[in-house]
Amino acid sequence: MKFGGTSMAGTERIRRVANIVRKQAALKPDGTRDEVAVVVSAMAGETDRLVNFCREANALYDPAEYDVVVASGEQVTSGLLALTLQSLGCKARSWLGWQLPVHTIEAHAKARIEDIDSEALLESLGRGEIAVIPGFQGLSGDGRITTLGRGGSDTSAVAVAAAIGADRCDIYTDVDGVYTTDPRIVAKARKLKAVTYEEMLELASVGAKVLQTRSVGLAMKEGVRVQVLSSFVDDNATPADALPGTMIVSEEEMNELVEKGEMERQHVTGIAHDKNEAKIILTRVPDRPGAVANIFEPLAKASINVDMIIQNVGRDKGETDVTFTVPQADLARAQALLEDQRGNIGFNRIITDSKIAKISVVGVGMKSHAGVASNMFRALAERGINIQAITTSEIKVSVLIDEDETELAVRVLHTAYGLDAKDEAA
Ligand code: ADP
Ligand code: ASP
Ligand code: MG
């Protein structure tokens, strides 16, 4: 079971979480009992607060010390949940990342889990103790605290589930499942009973932050059954075993659900948006072999991820404009690097814009159905929304637009692909 920041925000909410955990771990009518490991996030807002402290202390902070600071949020909530469970009469203890340990690579602030020692954990579970594990944190090979990148507790939960061979990994959050789009933006978003790993991976990577992208990739690789559901339920709510949330399933399972009439087959499953990218245009780059490599090599060396790329041909005199996007947080660094390489690349001007948004439509159905992209372009055009760049994958089409038009674009596309919830009253 994993509980996110909103679910853990304050002792009152932690008590509600403890109640959900207690019920899951309780003796069942048939005399059996589930063994339960719980992964928790820091209280909502806490990690942001800690990140700010680091910035104030030293703008060029050492990522290893940053990890020492930001990992503390989860240490607090794991101890508090163990205490609250004990107050409800449950046997519970916390297991910090360095105690298990959760082994990660040394890349501070964006570490990847390599392996989790599960022996002591399994013994403890076998003794009937509920294990409470802080998400987001681990231990590097050289014995220092690491963190997994923002939203990383989802990945901790899936990794723990894989390590102990759990039957299921229930991700409890502040919405009751995965929706056709962010339900905080589109009131008519519909909850999906199931979504495939592949679609969820794509949705997460293009901005649906309900699950961290890496957690979905790991679940897919390790075959972990993941369910997304709400922790904001009253004491008499249906237990998680009765599937009230969204199940992440394989394509075969999805086909079975469609055949049984439990899911509708759609060409587009969901729509996501991402306002965290920035656009860079380099004008009048020489149109010759190696020119594009000269642009992207220095960015790659600096670990700056480039997402969308367009090279406009057709300028006179063997010149071309190159447009691409980078994470907003890396824009200043990317710009400085490119300026530095101006002589080598040979461009005329750098134009940047961080007031952009990427809107993506995702669905496995588009593998076998033509016209999804053209419907998207038509629907946006009819509302006067201009497209600045386009990328596609087998199951996704993304466009770059003006940030101010984000909500409108998501709503228009949600309607255009027939995803709006039917009006209950109608
Ligand atoms: P937690 O703190 O539990 O990890 P997050 O804030 O990271 O929670 O993720 C939950 C949020 O994800 C929701 O509040 C919702 O606004 C957002 N979200 C974005 N896209 C979707 C989607 N397609 N379905 C459900 N929630 C979504
Ligand atoms: N507390 C961390 C964050 O806010 C990890 C998480 O909540 O998943 O990013
Ligand atoms: Mg999250």
Image (cartoon, helix red, strand yellow):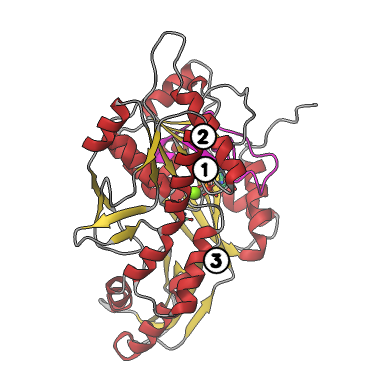
Q: Name the residue tied to disc 2.
A: 87
| Precedes in sequence: disc 3 or disc 1 | 1
- Residue type of the residue flagged with mark 1: Gly
Query: Does 114 appear in magenta?
Result: no
Q: Is residue 177 visible?
A: no
Main SS of residues in magenta: loop
Q: Is residue 239 visible?
A: yes
What span is colored magenta in the figure? 171-199
Q: Name the residue tied to disc 1.
A: 371
Extreme bottom residue here?
Answer: 343
| Precedes in sequence: disc 2 or disc 1 | 2
- What percent of the width, then of the height, locates residue 299? 33, 74
Q: Is residue 8 above or below residue 387?
A: above
- What percent of the width, then of the height, locates residue 178? 54, 38
Figure quadrant of the C terminus: top right
Q: CA distance from mark 3 to mark 2?
A: 56 Å
Pick whichever, 144 or 342, lies toward us. 144
Which residue lies at the image location 66% right of the left edge and 49% below the top edge?
A: 185
Q: Which mark is residue 353?
A: none
Figure quadrant of the N terminus: top left
Left or right of 49 on screen, residue 288: left
Q: CA distance from mark 3 to mark 1?
A: 20 Å
- What percent of the width, then of the height, locates residue 12? 62, 42
- Residue type of the residue flagged with mark 2: Ser
Q: Name the residue tied to disc 3.
A: 388
Left or right of 164 on screen, residue 44: right
Q: Nearer the viewer, mark 3 or mark 2?
A: 2
- What percent of the width, then of the height, locates residue 367? 41, 38
- Residue type of the residue flagged with mark 3: Gln
| Precedes in sequence: disc 3 or disc 2 | 2
Q: Is residue 245 above or below residue 75?
A: above
Extreme top residue here?
Answer: 30
